[in-house]
C-alpha cells in the first residue's frame, strides 16, 4: 500500500499506527525511492510505503504521478491519501485534480489511452483501459488537522506553549520534552490518544485497508 | 530542422506523434519501449529523400537492417500485423515502408522495376547476384545485359521477400528504395544528409573526422576544447593513427589506447564541432562517461542546440544525464522529455516540458525513467 500524506508529522503519526499494528513500513520523501520500492514489491503488494509530499500541492502532484506510473504496471498496490479536513473538500479536490490530469493531452498518449476517473463512496477509482485494471485511491480526511487535534489534547499538559500555533506547539513539546525525538513523541501521543474518536476513525481506516488486501 | 513528427506502425510503434519537436528531445523509458525505434524513424525519414546517408556517408538504412538481425528480419520494420509503416516529418516529407512477400506493390510496380533495371544497367546487380560476379562485372566493365537476363532478374526479385521504401515530399515521390536479400540496397539516388546518428553498430571514424576538421580549419577549436577541459595538449596524426598528447605525460598515446569514456566524450565534442544546422541523434550518450564528462557534454550540446547549430534527439537510461540537462535553466524553452511506456503490445508516452520535469525531479524527487 502507498500512503501519501502531507508532512513530517503525518508521516510519524501514520508510522506509529502501523507500528502499533505490527506492520512494517518505509518512509520516503522521494518518488524515486517509491518507484524503486515498487520495482521490488511488484509481486507482493502488502508492504506499506509512506510518501511524505511536503505540502498539500505536492500531495496532488504526487498522486497524479503515481496514477500515471502505475498505469504501466501489471500489479500495483492500493493508494491511500491522508489530508487534513481544514483544507476543505479534499475528496472532491483530489478527484478533480486526477481527472484534470487524465484529460491533459500530453500526459496520456496516444489519445484514447487516458484512464477514466470515477468517484466511489469511499474512494476514487482510476480505471485503466487495458486489462480492466483499477487503481483504488482511498481518501481519509483528518478532522480539523492532525496538529490542532494533538494540540487540543495536550494543551493543558503543556500549557506553557498554548500561544503557539499547532505546528510550533508540537515542535516545542518535542524539542523540550522528548529530546527532539519526534518518533517517540508521536508513539506516546498515539498511546494516550487512542480512544479519541478521530484517532479511532483513522486507525480503523488503516486497519480496513490492510485487512482488505485484495478487495473491499 | 524537424518541427513535427508522426510515426505509424514503424517497428513496435503503433502511433507516435510529436506536434512540437524541440531543439532538445530526450527519450526515456524502460527497455523495449520504443526509444530506439523512434530515433531510427527520425533518421530514416530525415534522410529518406537522399538515400539514408549521414553526414559522414554511413548508410543508416543498412546499419538499421544489420543491427536488427539482418535481412531476415526486414519485415519487422513494419509493426506485426500491419501492411505498411509511415513516418512523416514537418507534414511534408513522408517515408512509406512496405513489405512484400512477392510481387511489387501494384501502384508502384513500374517504378520499382525501373529501379531494378537501372541497377542492372549500372552493373550494381545481376541475375547471378553474388559478390564474385558483382566484382567481376565491375572489373570487366559495364556489359550490355541481355533482355532475357533483365527479365529473369526482375522476376527473381519479384518473387523474393522485399522491403520497399518510398520518400514523398507532399504527394510527389522524391526517391525510392528496394531491399532484397543478397542484393545491395537499390536506391534511386544517394547523397549525404546533414545528420549524425551515434549509437550501436554505427562507427564514427575519428581519423576521417579528424582529417575533415583539419581541412575545414576547425581542428584548432577541437584542440582548444581538449586543452581547456580535458588536459589534452594536442592531437596529431602519424602513420595513420591519431596520437594524443596529454598534459604531464611525456610519450603520446595512440587514440585507440585511450579510455572508453575519453573516446565517448571526444566523439560528442567532434560531432558538436562538425554539425551545422543539422540533426544529431545520440543513443545512450552517457555510456562509459564519468559524471564530470557527462556534465561537460550536456553543457556543450545544450548550447549548440539552443543556438540552432543542431537539433538533438537523445535516448537515455541515465538519471544524471537528464538532471544535467534540467540544471541548465537556459534550456527552459528548448527542451522536452518524452517518457515511453509499454502497455502490452501498445507503446504509450508522456511529454514533459522543462518546468514540469524539473519541478517533478526537484519537488517530488521523481525518477523520470519511471518504475
Image (spheres, rainbow, N blue to C red):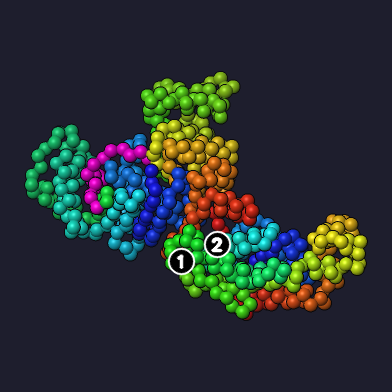
Residue at (24% x, 56% y) in the render: B161
Q: Nearer the viewer, mark 2 or mark 1?
A: 1
User: In the rendering, at what x and y percent does residue B79 appear?
Assistant: 35, 60
At x 63%, y 51%, the residue is B362
Residue at mark 2 shares a chain with residue at mark 1: yes
Question: Where residue B111 appears, x then y in whole percent?
Answer: 17, 51
Which of the pair B92/A174 is nearer the observer?
B92
The numbered dot on residue A113 is 1
Secondary structure beneath dot 1 equals helix
Looking at the image, residue B9 sits to the left or right of residue A144; the answer is left
> Can residue B202 be seen?
no
Region of the chain picked out in magenta, as a range: B171-195
Q: Please tell me whether mark 2 sits on a helix, a strand or a loop.
A: helix
For mark 1, name the chain.
A
The quarter in which the N terminus of chain B is drawn is top left
Chain bearing tag 2 is A
User: Which of the 4 image quadrants contains residue B100?
Assistant: bottom left
State the residue at coordinates (10%, 42%).
B145
Residue A91: where, in percent of width, then height? 64, 72
Q: Is residue B43 left or right of residue A182?
A: left
Is B92 above or below relative to B124?
Answer: below
Label annotation for residue A69? 2
Residue B164 horizontal side relative to residue A190, left or right: left
Considering the image in quadrants, where does the C terminus of chain B appear?
bottom right
Q: Is residue A120 above or below residue B26?
A: below
**Per the image, is B265 magenta?**
no
Left or right of B267? Residue A42 is right
Question: Which label sits on residue B79?
Answer: none
Which residue is more in the foreground, B91 or B344?
Answer: B91
* Residue neighbourhood size for the residue with mark 1, other residues' Cα within 10 Å, grouped as few (<14), some (14–19), many (≥20): some
Residue B179 falls within the magenta-colored stretch: yes
Amino acid at each position: 500500500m502507498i500512503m501519501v500524506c502531507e508532512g513530517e508529522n503525518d508521516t510519524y503519526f501514520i508510522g506509529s499506527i502501523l507500528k502499533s499494528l505490527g506492520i512494517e513500513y518505509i518512509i520516503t520523501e522521494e518518488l524515486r525511492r517509491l518507484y524503486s520500492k515498487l520495482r521490488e514489491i511488484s509481486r507482493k503488494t502488502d508492504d506499506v510505503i509512506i510518501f511524505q509530499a511536503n505540502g498539500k500541492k505536492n500531495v496532488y502532484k504526487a498522486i497524479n504521478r503515481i496514477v500515471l506510473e502505475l498505469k504501466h504496471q501489471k500489479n500495483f498496490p492500493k493508494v491511500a491519501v491522508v489530508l487534513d479536513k481544514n483544507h476543505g473538500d479534499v475528496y472532491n479536490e483530489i478527484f478533480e485534480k486526477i481527472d484534470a490530469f487524465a484529460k491533459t493531452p500530453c500526459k496520456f498518449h496516444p489519445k484514447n489511452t487516458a484512464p477514466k476517473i470515477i468517484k466511489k463512496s469511499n474512494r476514487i477509482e482510476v480505471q485503466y483501459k487495458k486489462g480492466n485494471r483499477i487503481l483504488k485511491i482511498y481518501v481519509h480526511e483528518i478532522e480539523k488537522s492532525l496538529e490542532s487535534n494533538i494540540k487540543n489534547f495536550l494543551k493543558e499538559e503543556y500549557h506553557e506553549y498554548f500561544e503557539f500555533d499547532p505546528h510550533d506547539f508540537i515542535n516545542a513539546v518535542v524539542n523540550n520534552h522528548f529530546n527532539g525525538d519526534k518518533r517517540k513523541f508521536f508513539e506516546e501521543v498515539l498511546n494516550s490518544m487512542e480512544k479519541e474518536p478521530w484517532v479511532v476513525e483513522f486507525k480503523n481506516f488503516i486497519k480496513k485497508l490492510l485487512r482488505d488486501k485484495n478487495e473491499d | 530542422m524537424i518541427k513535427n513528427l508522426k510515426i505509424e506502425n514503424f517497428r513496435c510503434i503503433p502511433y507516435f506523434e510529436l506536434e512540437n519537436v524541440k531543439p532538445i528531445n530526450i527519450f526515456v523509458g524502460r527497455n523495449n519501449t520504443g526509444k530506439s525505434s523512434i530515433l531510427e524513424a527520425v533518421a530514416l525519414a530525415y534522410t529518406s529523400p537522399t538515400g539514408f546517408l549521414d553526414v559522414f556517408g554511413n548508410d543508416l538504412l543498412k546499419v538499421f537492417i544489420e543491427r536488427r538481425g539482418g535481412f531476415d528480419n526486414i519485415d519487422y520494420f513494419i509493426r506485426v500485423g500491419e501492411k505498411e509503416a509511415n513516418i512523416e516529418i514537418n507534414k511534408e516529407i513522408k517515408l512509406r515502408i512496405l513489405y512484400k512477400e512477392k510481387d511489387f506493390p501494384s501502384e508502384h510496380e513500374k517504378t520499382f522495376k525501373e529501379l531494378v533495371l537501372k541497377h542492372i544497367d549500372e552493373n550494381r546487380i545481376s541475375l547471378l547476384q553474388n559478390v564474385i560476379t558483382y566484382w567481376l562485372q565491375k572489373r570487366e566493365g559495364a556489359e550490355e545485359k541481355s533482355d532475357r537476363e533483365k527479365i529473369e532478374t526482375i522476376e527473381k526479385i519479384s518473387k523474393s521477400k522485399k522491403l520497399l521504401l518510398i520518400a514523398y515530399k507532399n504527394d510527389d515521390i522524391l526517391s525510392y528504395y528496394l531491399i532484397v536479400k543478397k542484393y545491395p540496397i537499390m536506391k534511386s539516388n544517394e547523397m549525404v544528409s546533414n545528420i549524425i546518428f551515434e549509437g550501436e553498430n554505427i562507427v564514427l571514424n575519428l581519423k576521417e573526422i579528424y582529417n575533415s576538421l583539419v581541412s575545414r580549419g576547425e581542428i584548432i577549436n577541437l584542440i582548444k576544447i581538449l586543452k581547456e577541459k580535458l588536459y589534452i595538449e594536442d592531437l596529431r596524426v602519424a602513420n595513420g593513427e591519431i596520437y594524443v598528447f596529454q598534459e604531464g605525460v611525456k610519450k603520446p598515446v595512440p587514440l585507440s589506447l585511450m579510455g572508453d569514456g575519453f573516446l565517448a566524450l571526444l566523439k560528442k565534442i567532434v560531432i558538436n564541432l562538425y554539425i551545422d544546422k543539422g540533426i544529431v541523434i545520440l543513443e545512450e550518450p552517457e555510456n562509459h562517461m564519468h559524471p564530470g564528462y557527462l556534465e561537460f557534454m550536456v553543457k556543450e550540446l545544450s548550447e549548440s542546440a539552443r543556438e540552432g547549430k543542431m537539433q538533438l534527439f537523445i535516448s537515455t537510461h541515465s538519471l544524471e544525464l537528464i538532471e544535467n540537462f534540467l540544471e541548465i535553466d537556459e534550456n527552459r524553452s528548448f527542451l522536452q522529455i518524452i517518457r515511453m511506456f509499454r502497455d502490452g503490445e501498445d507503446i504509450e508516452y508522456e511529454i514533459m516540458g522543462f518546468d514540469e520535469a524539473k519541478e517533478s525531479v526537484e519537488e517530488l524527487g521523481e525518477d523520470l525513467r519511471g518504475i
